[in-house]
């Protein structure tokens, strides 16, 4: 009888241990199937020294908000700096070391893994006369040397175009600027376009596919203090057609320092971001993405801020950003404002959309 009781207890113990093992693995599986990221293009759009005392409280507030989202990584789609360093190769090298390194230190100080795209400011800011075009290799070298993006892109754009695969997400970053026959073109073409297609084909098993590039692709986009650069040929370009063919879910862009969402053929173009130090650009808009199983949740959020004081000097731009930026009392009191939501679901290869509000709801109305 005692032996039967002992055996019963041992069986009960092993069942308990096995159940605990299954629960732990279930919890780990749930964690592994959830991925969060945050996107905020055009941060800062000017040469902001690190540190700059009259910006630090606002920067701290914003980056702590980003931290609170618990992202695996953040996306910053171009125009991290002012970049008007076109006086000489030495000017590019020195200022690149100062401002790219300072920008990267800010991300590192908050423990943020970042994936950036190259914008027009990283190439000296538009337009590009002959003298500036000659410096493009130096601008690109400063960017790659100090930001150190992945080197898995096309041979002619190592560290400028690249992909990241995180579980069910494929992220492709492109450089939307090409020097062709000694002129600057706003396009994704040639070797880079071939690489984009090959990468999408190789990762066709990814449930969700996102591409980030600095300029807008199509449509009428809201803009504040922006050159409003757009991809040549828009929806008629081979680049856009490639994204459609391979079922890309979203394209993230900066450049416009405002928010516009448009949808076409299953691609959500999400233009968002900011420009620090301009009175007219009084919000920092950012996007939170979360993959949860077969669902991709997207949430646009807004922080109000104020630019004050005289103009801060920037290289070749005396009327640079305002010398002081503060977070608006409305945001300090209420926190970030949600300005749009969307959930993309995939079941048996079919996409459906739900939880549509704000900017995303406006996009669906415009696409009808």
Image: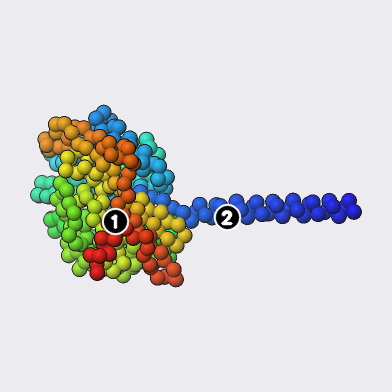
- Rendered position, 163 above or below 73: below
Q: Position of residue 196 (x, y in %)?
A: 31, 62
Per the image, label 2 sits on a secondary structure element best described as: helix
Q: Position of residue 368 (x, y in %)?
A: 24, 69
Identify which residue is drawn at 32% across, 37% down: 333
What residue is shown with label 1?
358
Which quadrant of the rendered structure holds the N terminus? bottom right
State the image quarter where residue 147 is shown.
top left
Identify which residue is drawn at 56% across, 52% down: 27
Q: Nearer the viewer, residue 105 or 34?
A: 34
- Rendered position, 286 above or below 193: above
- Report crowding for label 1: few under 14, some 14 to 19, many 20 or more residues within 10 A (C-alpha): some
State the image quarter where residue 161 is shown.
bottom left
Q: Position of residue 244 (x, y in %)?
A: 29, 68
Q: Nearer the viewer, residue 354 or 177?
A: 354
Q: CA distance from mark 1 to mark 2?
A: 35 Å
Q: Nearer the viewer, residue 217 or 176?
A: 217
Of mark 1 and mark 2, the one earlier in the sequence is 2
What residue is shown with label 2?
26
Per the image, label 1 sits on a secondary structure element best described as: strand
> Is residue 236 shown to the viewer in this render?
yes
> Is residue 152 shown to the viewer in this render?
no
């Amino acid at each position: 009888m005692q032996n039967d009781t002992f055996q019963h207890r041992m069986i009960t113990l092993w069942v308990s241990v096995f159940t605990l093992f299954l629960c732990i693995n279930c919890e780990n599986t749930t964690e592994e199937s959830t991925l969060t990221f945050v996107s905020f293009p055009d941060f800062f759009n000017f040469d902001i020294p690190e540190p700059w005392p009259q910006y630090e409280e606002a920067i701290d507030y914003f980056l702590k908000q980003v931290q609170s989202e618990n992202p695996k990584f953040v996306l910053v789609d171009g125009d991290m700096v002012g970049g008007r360093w076109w006086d000489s190769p030495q000017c590019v090298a020195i200022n690149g070391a100062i401002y790219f390194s300072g920008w990267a230190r800010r991300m590192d100080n908050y423990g943020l893994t970042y994936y950036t795209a190259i914008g027009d400011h990283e190439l000296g800011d538009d337009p590009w006369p002959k003298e500036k075009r000659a410096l493009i290799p130096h601008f690109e070298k400063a960017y790659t040397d100090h930001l150190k993006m992945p080197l898995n892109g096309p041979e002619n754009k190592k560290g400028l175009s690249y992909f990241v695969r995180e579980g069910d997400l494929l992220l492709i970053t492109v450089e939307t600027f090409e020097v062709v026959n000694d002129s600057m073109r706003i396009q994704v073409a040639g070797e880079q376009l071939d690489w984009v297609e090959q990468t999408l084909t190789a990762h066709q098993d990814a449930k969700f596919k996102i591409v980030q590039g600095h300029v807008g692709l199509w449509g009428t986009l809201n803009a504040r203090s922006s050159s409003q650069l757009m991809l040549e040929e828009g929806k008629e370009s081979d680049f856009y057609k490639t994204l459609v063919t391979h079922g890309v879910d979203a394209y993230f862009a900066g450049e416009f320092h405002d928010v516009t969402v448009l949808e076409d053929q299953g691609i959500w173009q999400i233009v968002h971001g900011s420009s620090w130090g301009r009175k007219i650009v009084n919000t920092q808009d950012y996007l939170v993405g979360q993959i949860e199983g077969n669902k991709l949740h997207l949430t646009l959020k807004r922080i109000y801020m104020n630019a004050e004081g005289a103009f801060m000097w920037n290289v070749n731009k005396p009327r640079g950003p305002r010398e002081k930026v503060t977070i608006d009392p409305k945001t300090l009191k209420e926190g970030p404002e949600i300005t749009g939501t969307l959930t993309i679901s995939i079941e048996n290869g079919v996409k459906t959309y739900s939880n549509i509000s704000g900017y995303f709801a406006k996009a669906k109305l415009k696409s009808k």
